[in-house]
Image (cartoon, grey):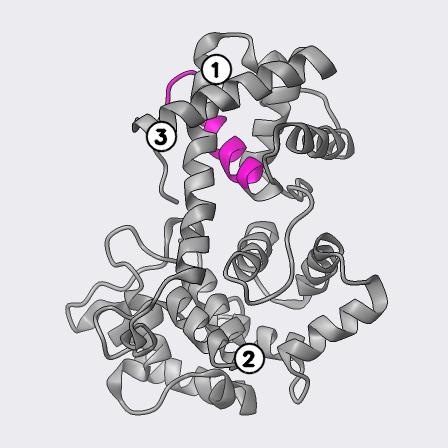
């Protein structure tokens, strides 16, 4: 742990202990090992949020937008598109990056080759796919064998998306998912229109708009709790949408819910309702200065090994 992180860890230990003095003992932190491991996971989660902020603010090579380049990156590309006022493309790139994910070995290769049409000319950009998503399904059917590695290039979904499919004929596959996203936006409505509509209906509070978007995205196929949370949180962190999660959205969660139960109940299966855990987690986050994104991520990883730190990369 770096000197900076050691200082941060000590401060986190102090604020967590202060919280317990004020609000009561946390059963999940009954040992020093549990507390120190949670703090280590919190620091990892803070770093991930801060890295997204770094991407948002950094000088970026325009080649990040080019899928023919080895340095293509959908998140950095989204930031660059957003800076140009190309908001629909920025949202679309974050969606693709979330759907396919960044594989630990293959990196963004799957996103890169699909977005870039395998170098065949043109892009599967927002303007193209939103005109007629069925054309993408036809293209995927013609190219899915290549995308699965027939050409010797490995292209895999990330660990969080490892159960997704490239099979064009599947009613749960990528083509259906992308088409359902287009239907959710409902062109000629734009992503900016979606936000403006929600500002009129729920106000401009970033937490309220996030929650409304989260609920409306039930219409996107195979984008469950984690997919929606990660996608919307990334849009906020990258400065593409004025949104931020106000809670960890524990309903339907597995790891984060188990982590919250462990923290407040002492066991991963503690008999505490989702509603109670959400309320207590919000209070914990407010008192410690830790946001919902950090807590959601850290608790998920901490509950896997609560007494011994393991680094998780997603």
Q: Mark 3 points at which residue?
A: 4
In the rendered image, the residue lying farthest to the right is 201
In this view, 159 is above or below 109? above
Q: Does the magenta stretch include residue 297?
A: yes
Tag count: 3
130 sits left or right of 185 in the view: left
Give the magenta range.
Answer: 294-309
Q: Mark 1 points at which residue?
A: 34
- Location of the C terminus by quadrant is top left
Callout 2 crowding tier (Cα within 10 Å): few <14, some 14–19, many ≥20: some
Is tag 2's residue or tag 1's residue first in the polypeptide sequence? 1
SS under mark 1: helix
Q: Quadrant of residue 295?
A: top right
Say which label, 3 or 1, has the lower sequence index: 3
The answer to whether residue 234 of the structure is visible from this angle is yes
In the rendered image, the residue lying farthest to the top is 31
Q: What element carries label 3?
A: helix
Residue 128 higher or lower than 244, as above or below: below
Q: Quadrant of residue 23?
A: top right
Q: How crowded is mark 1: few (under 14 residues within 10 Å), some or many (20 or more)?
A: many
Q: Name the residue under label 2.
A: 88
- Which comes before the other along the chain, label 3 or label 2? 3
252 or 50: nearer the viewer: 50
Looking at the image, can residue 144 be seen?
Answer: no
Mark 3 surroundings within 10 Å by alpha-carbon count, few (fewer than 14), some (14 through 19), many (20 or more): few
Which quadrant is home to the N terminus?
A: top left
Q: Is residue 136 left or right of residue 285?
A: left
Rendered location of residue 247, percent (x, y) = 68, 42
User: x, y percentage for residue 26?
Assistant: 63, 14
Kindly report the distance in space between the C-alpha atoms of the residues bearing marks 3 and 1: 21 Å
Is residue 182 covered in magenta? no
Q: Residue 104: give x, y in percent of width and height.
A: 28, 50
């Amino acid at each position: 742990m770096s000197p900076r992180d050691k200082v941060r860890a000590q401060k986190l230990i102090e604020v967590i202990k202060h919280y317990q003095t004020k609000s009561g003992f946390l059963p999940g932190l009954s040992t020093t090992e549990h507390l120190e491991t949670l703090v280590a996971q919190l620091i990892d989660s803070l770093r991930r949020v801060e890295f997204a902020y770094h991407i948002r603010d950094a000088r970026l090579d325009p080649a990040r937008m080019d899928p023919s380049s080895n340095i293509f990156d959908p998140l950095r590309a989204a930031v660059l598109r957003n800076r140009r006022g190309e908001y629909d493309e920025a949202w679309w790139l974050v969606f693709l990056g979330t759907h396919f994910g960044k594989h630990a070995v293959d990196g963004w290769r799957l996103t890169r080759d699909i977005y870039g049409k395998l170098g065949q000319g043109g892009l599967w950009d927002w303007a193209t796919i939103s005109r007629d998503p069925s054309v993408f399904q036809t293209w995927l059917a013609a190219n899915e064998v290549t995308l699965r590695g027939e050409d010797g290039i490995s292209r895999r979904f990330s660990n969080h998306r490892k159960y997704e499919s490239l099979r064009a004929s599947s009613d749960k596959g990528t083509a259906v998912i992308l088409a359902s996203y287009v239907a959710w936006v409902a062109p000629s409505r734009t992503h900016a229109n979606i936000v403006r509509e929600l500002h009129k209906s729920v106000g401009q509070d970033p937490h309220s708009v996030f929650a409304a978007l989260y609920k409306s995205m039930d219409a996107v196929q195979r984008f469950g709790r984690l997919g929606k949370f990660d996608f919307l949180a990334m849009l906020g962190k990258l400065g593409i949408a004025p949104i931020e999660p106000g809670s960890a959205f524990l309903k339907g969660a597995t790891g984060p819910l188990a982590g919250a139960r462990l923290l407040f109940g002492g066991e991963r299966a503690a008999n505490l309702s989702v509603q109670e855990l959400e309320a207590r987690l919000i209070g914990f986050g407010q008192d410690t200065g830790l946001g919902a994104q950090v807590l959601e991520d850290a608790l998920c990883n901490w509950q896997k090994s609560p007494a011994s730190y393991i680094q998780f990369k997603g």
